[in-house]
Amino acid sequence: MSVNDVQASLVALRSKFSGRAREEILFLSRQAEKMSEGKLTGAELSEAYHVLHRLAGSAGTFGLPDLGEAARVLEKSLKPHVERLAATGVADDAIAPVEPLFLRGIEGLFGLVTDQPASVPDSQNKTVEGVDDDSHGTQVRILVCHQSADVRLSLVQGLARYGFQCLEVSLTSPDLAGVIAESSRVASVFVVGEQQLEGVASECRSQNVGGRQLPVLCLAGHDSFEKRYWAAEAGAEGFFSEPLDFPRLADSIERLVSERRYRLSGRVLIVEDDSDLAEHYRLVLESSGVEVRLVSDTRHLMQDLAEFQPDIVLMDVNLAGRSGITLARLIRFEPRWLSLPIIYLSSEDDPESQLVAMSEGADEFLSKPITDDYLVRSVLHRCHRARQLSELMNRDSLTGLLKHALVKQQVHKELASCRRLGYRSCVAMVDLDHFKQVNDTWGHGCGDRVIKALANLLKNRLRETDVIGRYGGEEFVVVLPGCDVGQAQSVIEGIGRSFSELLFFGNDEDSFSVTLSAGIAALNDFSDGDVALEAADQALYQRKSAGRNGVSVYTVPE
Ligand SMILES: Nc1nc2c(ncn2[C@@H]2O[C@H](COP(=O)(O)OP(=O)(O)OP(=O)(O)O)[C@@H](O)[C@H]2O)c(=O)[nH]1
């Protein structure tokens, strides 16, 4: 949806809300009249209270904050009576007039439903634009800016081995600002010489919108504390000197890109019975790059959770006929959702009541009405935190790849899916050659850098739909959906070739390279994921015995 379409939809929702608010106030004024005549029943009083509660929570979001405030004051004046009625349980009898000024207050609400402006004001509309960052499968763009043509060439060639797409830019390009603006929409990182650092960093800073500033890595002629301090002060997010350590540079790029991706994206499940309000939240969040699913029927909540796998849930506390608090407790029945952050959306502003509600299974409270800007920022922040935590649990800390148990699960899942749907998929077991020698010769820290380099290469060269996991120390598993063994073999062989061309620095002077071996099995040949993994492992073993540095395919015995 284009920015203009989103804007038009938000304006349409606002004007729809104004119409609805007028109808609701008309309803309230009839109830208030009945009350002053002593004809209002307890059930009707409760209904009026809920209508006021809804108005108080939503009017601000639709650009009518005064209406929201006034409704909140009236809602609070009814609250003790509604609570007393709930305790005594008398719903059908007429109740005594509760507030002499109530009728006048309700009538005052009419004047607060002003005609809606033709566009959403800037302060409401200040959202962060979406970023199509995705380092795994989508190419990461490196903007190379350096005074030396030789260094530029070596950067472009060295980084291309990792699958990074390089674009040479010059500080004097008239379109530098345009390149930066355009690159903010894809996963991009600047690698610049020290002479270009200040100019590029300041241009990136001036174009920073909502935390989208492009990261800049500095490539200096030599290394010293003073030089590093100067680079940090100028705004660099990483420092490298010549001779360039490509594996370390690639690792920094990968880290920066994935951090940015987590910061600027998220998946939110919204449970809100006011469909206009839910639609408003959806439009605002989606236009900021957040994926949203609205739960239209709470009976399907668990199915929605399983299908959508959100980072967080935004849950209205008072839903028609159901309680958000009870739903939060119900979600926690399933152990897999115990750590899922649930955030209540409510017009409840009493901290004591908020605390009571939170003790029932949710993590936080967002008080309605919420401005668009606040909604986007708080949702992105919470999604980022949730992803960080889930990364810690599911991902290997050295490489950021899936841990052993999770990658095994993915093998089982893919096997079931390709057998059911009749397409071909493969699993590959990839292992570094003579890695013990690397550790013994260059030290464990250097060995770790080699492991990370292979992880980064796999992330950049494989498709987004491929699954990559660290299976053991220097052993990786890759699942390649939709690939036959021939295609899988040529992909892994290509990665093996690129990997063998990487130069690692054991110390300042000496460099070395490492090769890899791999075994591939066609998942469709097996009915069990573990057996498929064993077959890939056997093929790997064959490759090791046949001299390493290559890929073998498992052949099913006749
Ligand atoms: N640096 C580092 N080394 C690790 C890590 N995990 C395992 N290793 C080392 O990886 C080495 C694996 O050695 P071996 O299983 O003998 O295999 P290899 O030397 O690669 O020999 P081949 O596989 O037969 O080519 C051992 O020295 C482990 O200590 C890690 O996280 N970091």
Image (tube, rainbow, N blue to C red):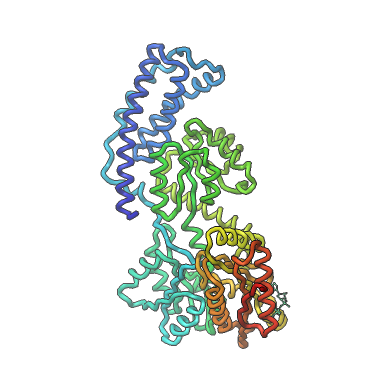
Horizontal and vertical percent for residue 51?
41, 28
Residue at 63% across, 41% down: 333
Q: Quadrant of the N terminus?
A: bottom left
Q: Quadrant of the C terminus?
A: bottom right
For the image shown, how many numbered marks are present on the structure?
Answer: 0
**Residue furthest out toward the front:** 558
Residue at 41% across, 12% down: 39
Q: Nearer the viewer, residue 154 or 456?
A: 456
Side of 62 where 138 appears, left or right: right
Ligand 1 found in image quarter: bottom right
State which quadrant residue 32 falls in: top left
Side of 98 where 108 appears, left or right: left
- Establish if 216 lies above or below 500: above
Residue at 44% across, 25% down: 49
Q: Nearer the viewer, residue 252 or 100?
A: 252
- Establish if 166 lies above or below 509: above
Residue 256, can we see it? Answer: no
Residue 155, can we see it? Answer: yes
Horizontal and vertical percent for residue 120?
31, 46
- Establish if 244 lies above or below 369: below
Horizontal and vertical percent for residue 16?
31, 37
Horizontal and vertical percent for residue 100?
40, 16
Side of 521 where 31 appears, left or right: left
